[in-house]
């Protein structure tokens, strides 16, 4: 079992920066991919960024490419999403996700078997 806890959400003005964190605990050695998703009411959960744990490779959605960065601190077992030049359309609940599946499809929610509770990010004009 793996437990994920997000933190760092909040309110920020358009053009600003915010970093959200995800602390992982439990059987993290079994994990293959860590990722960030976001969701707004009435819309599907969107894959934002993902990081493969067994190789130096990441996925960044086109909607945030060049503005968001995914990284992790191995010693702290923590995943980060650095959000720069944020826009009002980045407002959403941001979820941390993890999977032990050896998958190359990382932007689809169904491949993830562990989820955090989410943290709200609100970007104002």
Image: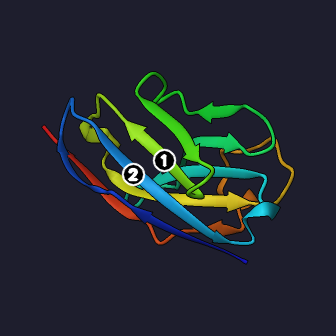
Q: CA distance from mark 2 to mark 1?
A: 6 Å
Residue at screen point 49% across, 25% down: 65
Residue at screen point 33% across, 31% down: 84
Picture quadrant where residue 106 is located: top right
The residue that mark 1 highlights is 80
- Local SS, label 2: strand
Which residue is outermost to the bottom?
1
The residue that mark 2 highlights is 20
Number of other residues with Cα within 10 Å of mark 1, as a class: few under 14, some 14 to 19, many 20 or more = many
The spot of residue 14 in percent (x, y) is 19, 34
Q: Are marks 2 and 1 in contact (CB under 8 Å)?
A: yes
Q: How many marks?
A: 2
Q: Nearer the viewer, residue 26 or 36?
A: 26
Question: Tag 1 or tag 2, which sits nearer the N-term?
Answer: 2
Tell me the colour scheme of the image.
rainbow
The spot of residue 18 in percent (x, y) is 30, 43
Q: Is residue 32 above or below residue 3?
A: above
On screen, residue 54 versus residue 44, left or right, reads right
The spot of residue 4 in percent (x, y) is 56, 69
Residue at screen point 31% across, 57% down: 9
- Quarter containing the N terminus: bottom right
Residue at screen point 50% across, 59% down: 22
On screen, residue 63 versus residue 9, left or right, reads right
The spot of residue 11 in percent (x, y) is 19, 52
- Local SS, label 1: strand
Which residue is outermost to the right?
102
Number of other residues with Cα within 10 Å of mark 2, as a class: few under 14, some 14 to 19, many 20 or more = many
């Amino acid at each position: 079992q793996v437990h994920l806890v997000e933190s760092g959400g909040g309110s920020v003005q358009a053009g600003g920066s915010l970093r959200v964190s995800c602390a992982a605990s439990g059987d993290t050695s079994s994990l293959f991919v860590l990722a960030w998703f976001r969701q707004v009411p009435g819309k599907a959960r969107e894959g934002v960024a993902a990081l493969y744990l067994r190789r130096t490779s990441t996925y960044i959605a086109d909607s945030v490419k060049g503005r968001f960065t995914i990284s992790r601190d191995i010693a702290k077992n923590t995943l980060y999403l650095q959000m720069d030049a944020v826009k009002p359309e980045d407002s959403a609940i941001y979820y941390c996700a993890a999977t032990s599946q050896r998958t190359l499809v990382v932007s689809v929610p169904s491949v993830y078997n562990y989820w955090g509770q989410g943290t709200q990010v609100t970007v104002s004009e």
